[in-house]
Amino acid sequence: MSKPAYIEFAAKDLAATKAFFQKVFQWRFEDYGPAYTAFFATNFEGGFYEAPLASSVKSGGALLVLYAEDLPACLAQVEAAGGEISQDIFVFPGGARFHFIEPSGNELAVWSEKAAPEAS
């Protein structure tokens, strides 16, 4: 049986991307040369490689969905750290989520099984 083990994203600005994910999600990073950094999140690992590309749902990219217990608080942290909200909090069967663009242009999402009161 196989399960996802590692995910990689392009990043046009490695320093800004690292600072964003450290501040908002407390990811740890380890650089492997000037053009690659690995990240260590709570439940998974991955990396960012320097390239003028970005992943988005509109272009058919995979959507990495992170978890937060308090969506409104997480959304505020994303904005305060320089992220752009691409889809505000919305409710769906099983919870609620929002989408954001990090400083290098990659789109990710954050979900919670708890529907945010203002999104209901």
Image: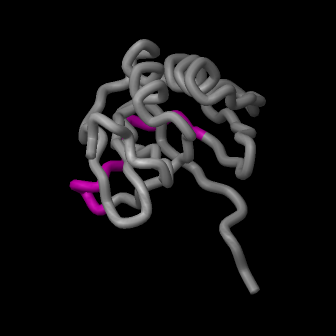
Give the extent of the magenta segment. 48-60
Residue 9 on the magenta segment: no
Question: In the image, is residue 58 part of the stretch drawn in magenta?
Answer: yes
- 31 vs 39: above or below: above
Residue, x 38% and y 40% (percent of image)? 116
Q: Residue 54 appears at what percent x and percent y?
A: 37, 42
Which residue is at the front of the view, 11 or 77?
A: 77
- Which quadrant, please, contains the N terminus? bottom right
| Residue 53 visible | no
Quadrant of residue 36 in the image? top right
Q: Nearer the viewer, residue 26 or 92?
A: 92
The x, y position of residue 60, in whole percent, is 29, 62
Q: Is residue 64 visible?
A: yes
Left or right: where 20 falls relative to 33: left
Residue at image point 38% right, 24% down: 83
* Magenta span dominant secondary structure: loop
The foreground one among 21 and 15 is: 21
Q: Does residue 19 appear left or right of residue 106 in this picture?
A: right
